[in-house]
Image (cartoon, helix red, strand yellow):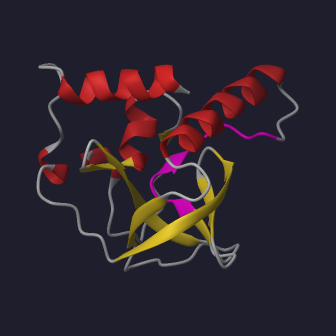
Amino acid sequence: MLVLLLLLGESLNSQNFTPDPYFQEQPIIERTAVVSRVIDGDTIELEGGEKVRLVGVDAPELRSSDPVERELAEKAKEFVDNLCPEGSEIGLNVDDLEPRDRYGRTLALVYVSIDNSWITLNVELLRFGFAEILYLPPSEFNPYRW
């Protein structure tokens, strides 16, 4: 857990970190919420039972029949759990064009606070290789721009 946070912190503070211009401005946080649990690498449950699906990304499936995919799914879940553990506060920017998926989960960019700065969890999952791009228009967020 600590190693992942240190790696993330080092990468954010290193000279090699150049955020996409799309995310250089102050994030748009429509609301904050408290994490109840991390379901998997791209889904979080909030206090009160609301489920949030990270828009624009697709992490490997925990229930896959492929043992390699299941291992990757566990790593993605662990990454998310380390950045937004149970009881932590996150920021949300809900997709205005498609606020819910077919399962009723809220589609959103999820922000976590690292060293008093908000970072976009969706982007970090892609950057660290824990997820792939999943772009399903209509969406106000185009992960190909990240």
Q: Is residue 130 above or below residue 37?
A: above
Does the magenta portion include 55? yes
Magenta-colored span: 53-62
Whether residue 59 sits left or right of residue 16 in the image: it is: right
Q: Quadrant of the N terminus?
A: top right
Q: Is residue 28 above or below residue 124?
A: below
Q: Residue at horizontal 32%, vertical 56%?
A: 142
Whether residue 124 sits left or right of residue 74 in the image: it is: left
Whether residue 5 sits left or right of residue 113 in the image: it is: right
Measuring from the top left, give residue 51's x and y in whole percent. Answer: 64, 69
Q: Residue at horizontal 28%, vertical 21%?
A: 10
Q: Residue at horizontal 76%, vertical 20%?
A: 68
Measuring from the top left, give residue 69's x and y in whole percent. Answer: 73, 27
Measuring from the top left, give residue 119's x and y in whole percent. Answer: 30, 48
In front of the other: 78 or 56: 78
In front of the other: 27 or 60: 27
Q: Quadrant of the C terminus?
A: top left
Q: How many marks?
A: 0
Instruction: Decide whether the magenta segment is chiefly helix, strand or loop.
Output: loop
Q: Residue at horizontal 74%, vertical 24%?
A: 71
Measuring from the top left, give residue 101's x and y in whole percent. Answer: 60, 72
Does the magenta portion include 103? no
Which residue reaches farthest right? 65
